[in-house]
Structures are given as C-alpha cells and as structure tokens.
Image: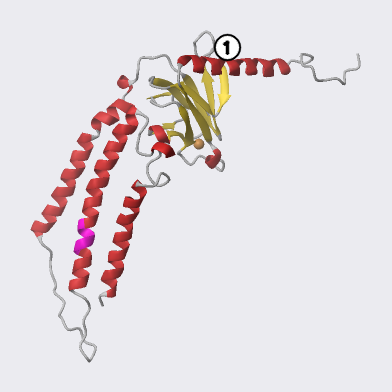
Amino acid sequence: MRKWSILFAMAAISTVGCFVYSYFDPDWWLPNTARDMHRVVSTFGREIDNLFLIILFVTGGVFIITQVVLVAAMYRFPDRRDEQGRPVRKAVYSHGSQLLELIWTVIPAGILVFIALYQMGTWASIKYRGSAPRVPPLAEITARQFQWVMRYPGPDRKLNTADDLVVIDDLHFVKKQSVLIYLKSADVLHSFYLPQLRIKQDAVPGLTIPVWFDCDEAGEYELVCAELCGWGHYKMRGNVTVHETEKDLRRWIDEKLAEQGRSQLAMIPGSGSEGGDRDD
Ligand SMILES: [Cu+2]
C-alpha cells in the first residue's frame, strides 16, 4: 500500500516547510526585535546564532536525506498481495552490513567532534572567567521565588554599601558597553535568560556567578527565568532597558534613588504628610 509512503512524505515536507516559514515570521524565528528580526543585537548573539545555523544545516541536511531514502523505499517496496491474499514477494533476512554500520557511525562521530571543537571559542568567550570584561560590576542580581532583586551601586559606585539602589525586575544598562553582573540565588535554582542577547546562566544557591554581555541597540528587551523554579516560575520576568548613554543610565539611577529615599522616609513614623488622625 503506497498511501503510507505519501503520508510519511507529507509529514517530512510539512516539517521542512515549518522551518522555511519560520525564517520569514518574526514570532517563529529566533528572539530578535520584531521590526528587525534577522539583526542580532549582541556580540554573543551573533556567535550563538552562527553555531545554531551550522547545527541546523547539518541536522536539516541529514533529515532531508534520510526522509527521501525512507519514502523512496516505502514507495518502491509496498506490501503486495496476490488474489489469495498471500504476499507476492518473500521477505529477505539480513544480518546487516558492517561497512554500512561503520559509515553511519564514523560520519556522525566526526560531525560531533567538529561541533565540539568549533564551539569552544564561543563557549570560552561567554563562560570562562578569564574572558570577563575588566569593568566594575553594573549590579548584583539575586533570583528568588519569584522575582529578580537587583542591587545597583549608589553614588559611591561601590556595591553592597548603604547607598545602594535596590529595585525589582528592572535591568538597566548602556548600549555598546560590556556589562558585568554578579548572579546569586536566595532559594532554589533559577536561570537568568536574556533571549534577545542569547545569554543564559543558572543562578545557583551558595554561588556568586559573574555574567557578562552587551547590546548594540538601545531599547526595551526582556529577562525571563528559564529554569522551572516553582508555581510562579511563569511570572518571573523582568524588563531590560538599554540606554543610549551613560548619562541616561545615571539619571535613571538617581531618580530611583530619590524614590527609594522617599519610601524609606515614609516608613519613619511622623515623617509623612498622611496620618491626619493624630489628635495633638
Ligand atoms: Cu525562577
């Protein structure tokens, strides 16, 4: 029956079709800005996408070849019966071919070794601590169920001092600058994921992990948690704002510091304008 070969061919064609379609649809392709879906906005993003495309071409090519062979074999050797319902052809029993097995073991092994060696430079530049930029840290980010607590240095430009700015789910930095953050977790495993910048790093309880990245276009991006960390995992997301200049970033920090000062003042009894129920 040849209908099976047609069914299998349709499944393979629609799979390849999905990949071709996704390239032209901003919601299906890799996370970039919708208006410029093929421009990757970070240095690491370009390297990661390059690796992704190489792996996609290799696996896609192998997929197409194997599907063509599979469908051709099904079409060429359908199940045929005579008038009495007996098979027309006798089955052939084979113990396999050593040469074939050798070929389909050595080629994939070679491809895997190639990918392992080829990606090493990218991995080193993103993850090896020796590659971290020599810049003062932008912030210390602590993941907790279910938010990102971000501590920025205050006017003294030093982290973990009394004048620090602490905000929730709000990452700000300047475009075209190497950014260094320290990542921590207060409870369970989380994963700090900047999809548009192709940065992903687990936050591990008990560890302080440096993470570095850049972005060459000012704008709004997103931060999400990429590790299932509990019931509220889905809402563990933050805003990322990339500023044009250092001045814009300082202005934002100063504004937030002023707000923080006001809310701290409000917590001191008798300092606010409210509380009109005092009868003295
Ligand atoms: Cu999380």
- Report if residue 78 is visible in the image: yes
Q: Residue furthest top?
A: 156
Q: Residue at x 50, y 26 (%)?
A: 171
Looking at the picture, how far across and down is residue 115, in whole percent?
Answer: 22, 39
Q: Which residue is mark 1?
A: 163
Looking at the picture, how far across and down is residue 254, in whole percent?
Answer: 57, 14
Q: Assign the N terminus to one quadrant of the image.
A: bottom left
Residue 68 sits inside the magenta stretch: yes
Q: Nearer the viewer, residue 253 or 21?
A: 21
Q: Nearer the viewer, residue 151 or 71?
A: 71
170 left or right of 107 in image = right
Q: Residue at x 41, y 20 (%)?
A: 180
Q: Which residues are magenta?
A: 65-69
Compared to 36, does 15 lie above or below?
below
Which is the main secondary structure of the residues drawn in magenta?
A: helix
Q: Residue at x 23, y 66 (%)?
A: 71
Looking at the picture, how far across and down is residue 67, in whole percent?
Answer: 23, 60
Q: Nearer the viewer, residue 35 or 53?
A: 35
Element carrying mark 1: loop
Compared to 100, does 278 lie above or below?
above
Residue 138 sits inside the magenta stretch: no
173 left or right of 122 in image = right
